[in-house]
């Protein structure tokens, strides 16, 4: 089990990571999700031992790894642009880690067959890595990291360079492989779809701090800040003031709202208005249709006050629209 | 990062100590010797000015001629597509790195008093003396310089030309410019920095030319380099030699700085290379392409062809014995190399010169790699320290071989009995080339490859073994070949430093060439052919290994 305890790191005199702590349990895949520049990759490199933290500890099964050099950590790392060895063929790339552990050549052969089968690259053994497509290179990189049975796997934006359809396929394969092998994994990405697909648990990183942590469903249904709701693109965010009791006044009307926060009259609050229409709600929003965009099985309708919703039926531009909404209060 | 600093100093240690002892210390001794009151006398200064003026004169003339041939040739390579183009291009690259003794021997075999042309004329018209005076004229010097440096102009200018966006020319044409005005108002102005850079580089090489002047110019012509040699070894006047060496260093340094200025202004545009090239269509174009192909072929091939052919041909008995002349093929000149004759120049069979050369070249390879690797690896990822140290490492490049050797003589005079000074001097000459070959290769290995290997369990040593070394081995081989060929052909420094009983191949060729008699001449041809073959193989090997787009000069 990996434990990260109070990691700090500065980069060019700017704080990059502040007080990062989390656990990765057996068989668990966690995902570090955050915009570029949030320090995700640096965190991975510190876990791999390629960079020292300014403060804090990285522990494996309770043992501090500070004095363990990177090549003895047994942590597999899949790089963003694969970092395949250009002078070696597929077989030698994948066998690299096994040779470093002085495996016998027949053991290496057996393991190679296994791993290449796992990533669907059987028959690619003696191809040059520079002749492979992006997706194939990605599979080689994965196989190379998997082969020596690492006790932890780390992925640094591994699908960033691939096109969308390929990305989805590979992501599902990867999910299956992680599930089958039960290797704990840390997956770094800025793409929430990737994160929600692959992760058992998501850690949201913002300004060097973990701002929210939970299962994909938890994070999605209960964003704990305006930034999280915005970053995940959960819906419309509107500003309002508490007028009395549970009433909030906003630029698009006065709504009644239930929330667990302790608000005073006059407090400024942010409301999340999810774009899906709901039944049986007290609050409703009216507006004139300004724009309609067709999106596969639905229409994205933007009203003239800037709010957007997803509707089943196509409205006419200029038409008045009325829809029931649920409001969530963000801090 | 702070913890890395002392380690970097350690890496720098060996190269800096080496340069300190074998370049900067001798350099300071030259300064002290050359700039003393006794040296700065009127007649010494007069000599210096006289020599300096001739050096400038021959270098300017050579550069001008080189441009005259080089510019149209660059145009030929950049714009036209013709049969045998890649072969011709390869041929033009070889001379640049050929040892001066080989080039001198080649021109001698073609145009010298015992060369093909003179002997043919003498045979045809039954003449008693060679009709063409070539060796010992300014023309010989100029021709050899053109032969050497045309490739520089071709490379730099044709690169620039083929990088020009053809749309600019098309735009000028559509705006009403005729072909001449397109050249004058569009193409030439855009080529100006490249032309300046090429000219300066050619001038720099012509300015510090030594072997060509000594071997082809004869005793009447003395450039700074030759005069340093004459003063140091024949007049035994080290202070005057030092004064001249100081002037030489100042000039080459100034030209190097100017060249660096201009070459950074040469912008490389990324127009598709082939878009600019076409087959010769009009009669004018066809005549141009044909004429220049023939000219380049004659210029580059004839001397290099004349040499090996002359080395296996007996064309004439000794002078005045034309009636008993033997004509035909012979291997005598080669077999003579293995015979130890009492009355010849050496007390050892001439072939030992080849063994000495190989030994020195081997030592140079080892030394320059040992010093070049640490220097190149820190230069590949430059920090603050490297910004200061980079010019220090490259400074010896500006110093000519003769100056380096003079520094050795002044600084380590008593040690001149040691044959080890020769490979040390060769290492100084080769080191900048070795570093410039290794540095881009080291820089081309991304850090994440090393990190990937590390996360797969490779210790630092095994990372080096399994990642760095396999990728660097090609560049290392190139660098080693560079050092090897440079040492093999090095003439200037060797002439000043080599002991008479430890001759190298170039020294042996020089000695043979300056002695009378057909046998000596033939042996010079044979030795030069051997050296040419070795060097050409080396050059072609380096060309093949060159990373695409990496360092031209």
Image (spheres, rainbow, N blue to C red):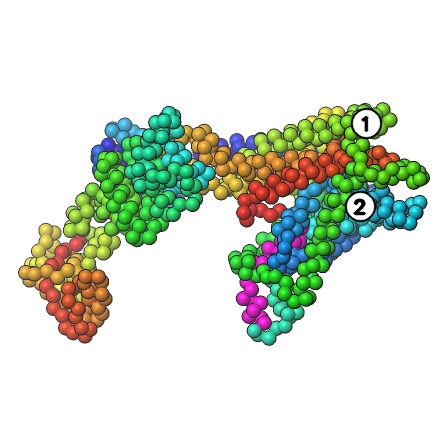
Q: Is residue B12 above or below residue A268?
A: above
Q: Residues within 10 Å of mark 1 (few under 14, many from 20)?
A: some
Which residues lie in the magenta part?
A: B151-173
The CA span between labels 2 and 1 is: 27 Å
Residue B212 visible in the displayed image: no
Q: Residues within 10 Å of mark 2 (few under 14, many from 20)?
A: many
Q: How many numbered discs, if any?
A: 2
Q: Nearer the viewer, residue B406 or A245?
A: B406
Residue A169 visible in the displayed image: yes
Left or right? Give the position of B503 relative to A10. right
For the point 31% across and 35% down, which residue is it?
A115
Instruction: Give the residue number, with chain letter if any, for mark 1.
Output: B346
Q: Secondary structure at mark 1?
A: loop
Residue B401, percent from left and from top: 71, 39
Q: Nearer the viewer, residue B92 or B265?
A: B92
Q: Same chain for marks 2 and 1?
A: yes
For the point 71% across and 51% down, which residue is it?
B297
Q: Is residue A217 magenta?
A: no
Left or right? Give the position of B389 relative to A173. right
For the point 38% across and 33% down, which residue is it?
A95
Instruction: Give the residue number, with chain letter if any, for mark 2.
Output: B110
Residue A68, percent from left and from top: 35, 28
Circle 1 chain: B
């Amino acid at each position: 089990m990996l434990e990260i305890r109070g990691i700090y790191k500065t980069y060019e005199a700017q704080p990059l990571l502040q007080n990062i702590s989390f656990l990765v349990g057996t068989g668990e895949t966690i995902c570090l999700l955050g915009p570029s520049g949030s320090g995700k990759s640096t965190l991975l490199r510190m876990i791999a031992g390629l960079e020292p933290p300014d403060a804090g500890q990285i522990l494996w099964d309770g043992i501090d790894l500070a004095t363990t050099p990177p090549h003895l950590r047994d942590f597999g790392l899949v790089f963003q642009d694969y970092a395949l060895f250009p002078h070696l063929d597929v077989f030698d790339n994948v066998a690299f880690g096994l040779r470093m552990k002085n495996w016998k050549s027949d053991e290496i052969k057996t393991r190679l067959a296994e791993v290449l089968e796992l990533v669907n690259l059987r028959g690619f053994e003696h191809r040059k890595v520079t002749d492979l497509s992006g997706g194939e290179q990605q599979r080689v990189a994965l196989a190379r990291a998997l082969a020596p049975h690492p006790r932890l796997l780390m992925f640094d934006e591994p699908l960033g360079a691939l096109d969308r359809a390929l990305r989805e396929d590979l992501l599902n394969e990867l999910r299956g492989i992680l599930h089958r092998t039960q290797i704990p994994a840390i997956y770094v990405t800025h793409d929430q779809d990737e994160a929600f697909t692959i992760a058992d648990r998501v850690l949201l990183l913002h300004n060097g701090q973990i701002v929210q942590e939970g299962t994909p469903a938890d994070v999605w249904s209960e964003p704990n800040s305006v930034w999280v709701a915005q970053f995940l693109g959960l819906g419309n965010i509107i500003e309002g003031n508490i007028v009395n009791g549970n009433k909030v006044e906003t630029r698009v009307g006065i709504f009644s709202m239930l929330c667990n926060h302790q608000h005073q009259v006059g407090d400024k609050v942010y409301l999340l208005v999810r774009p899906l229409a709901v039944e049986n709600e007290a609050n409703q929003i009216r507006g004139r249709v300004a724009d309609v965009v067709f999106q596969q099985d639905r229409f994205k309708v933007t009203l003239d006050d800037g709010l957007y919703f997803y509707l089943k039926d196509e409205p006419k531009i200029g038409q008045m629209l009325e829809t029931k909404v649920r409001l969530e209060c963000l801090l | 990062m702070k913890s890395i600093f002392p380690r970097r100093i350690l890496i720098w240690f060996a190269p800096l100590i080496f340069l300190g002892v074998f370049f900067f210390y001798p350099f300071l001794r030259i300064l002290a010797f050359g700039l003393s009151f006794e040296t700065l006398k009127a007649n010494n200064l007069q000599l210096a000015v006289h020599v300096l003026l001739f050096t400038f004169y021959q270098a300017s003339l050579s550069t001008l001629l080189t441009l005259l041939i080089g510019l149209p040739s660059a145009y030929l390579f950049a714009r036209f597509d013709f049969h045998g183009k890649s072969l011709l291009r390869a041929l033009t690259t070889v001379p640049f790195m050929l040892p001066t003794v080989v080039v001198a021997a080649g021109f001698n075999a073609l145009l010298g008093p015992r060369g093909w042309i003179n002997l043919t004329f003498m045979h045809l018209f039954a003449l008693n003396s060679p009709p063409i005076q070539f060796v010992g004229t300014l023309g010989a010097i100029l021709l050899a310089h053109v032969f050497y440096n045309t490739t520089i102009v071709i490379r730099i200018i044709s690169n620039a030309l083929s990088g020009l966006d053809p749309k600019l020319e098309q735009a000028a044409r559509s705006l009403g410019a005729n072909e001449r005005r397109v050249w004058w108002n569009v193409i030439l102005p855009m080529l100006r920095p490249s032309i300046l850079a090429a000219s300066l580089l050619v001038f720099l090489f012509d300015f510090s030319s030594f072997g060509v002047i000594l071997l082809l110019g004869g005793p009447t012509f003395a450039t700074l380099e030759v005069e340093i040699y004459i003063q140091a070894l024949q007049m035994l006047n080290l202070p005057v030699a030092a004064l001249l060496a100081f002037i030489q260093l100042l000039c080459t340094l100034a030209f190097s700085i100017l060249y660096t200025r201009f070459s950074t202004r040469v912008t490389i545009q990324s127009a598709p290379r082939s878009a600019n090239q076409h087959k010769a269509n009009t009669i004018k174009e066809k005549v141009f392409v044909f004429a220049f192909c023939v000219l380049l072929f004659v210029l580059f091939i004839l001397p290099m062809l004349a040499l090996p052919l002359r080395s296996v041909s007996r064309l004439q008995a000794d002078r005045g014995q034309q009636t008993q002349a033997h004509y035909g093929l012979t291997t005598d000149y080669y077999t003579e190399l293995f015979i130890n004759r009492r009355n010849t120049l050496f007390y050892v069979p001439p072939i030992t010169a080849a063994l000495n050369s190989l030994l020195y070249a081997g030592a140079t390879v080892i030394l320059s790699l040992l010093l070049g690797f640490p220097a190149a690896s820190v230069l590949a990822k430059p920090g603050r320290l490297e910004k200061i140290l980079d010019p220090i490492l490259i400074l010896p490049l500006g110093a000519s071989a003769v100056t380096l050797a003079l520094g050795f003589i002044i600084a380590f005079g008593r040690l001149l009995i040691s044959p080890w000074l020769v490979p040390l001097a060769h290492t100084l000459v080769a080191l900048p080339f070795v570093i410039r070959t290794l540095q881009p290769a080291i820089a081309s290995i991304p850090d994440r490859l090393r990190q990937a290997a590390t996360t797969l369990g490779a210790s630092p040593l095994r990372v080096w073994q399994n990642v760095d070394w396999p990728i660097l081995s090609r560049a290392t081989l190139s660098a080693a070949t560079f050092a090897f060929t440079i040492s093999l052909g090095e003439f200037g420094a060797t002439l000043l430093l080599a002991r008479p009983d430890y001759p190298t191949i170039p020294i042996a060729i020089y000695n043979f060439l300056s002695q009378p008699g057909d046998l000596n001449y033939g042996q010079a041809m044979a030795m030069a052919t051997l050296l040419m073959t070795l060097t050409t193989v080396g050059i072609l090997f380096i060309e093949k290994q060159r990373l695409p787009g990496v360092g031209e000069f």
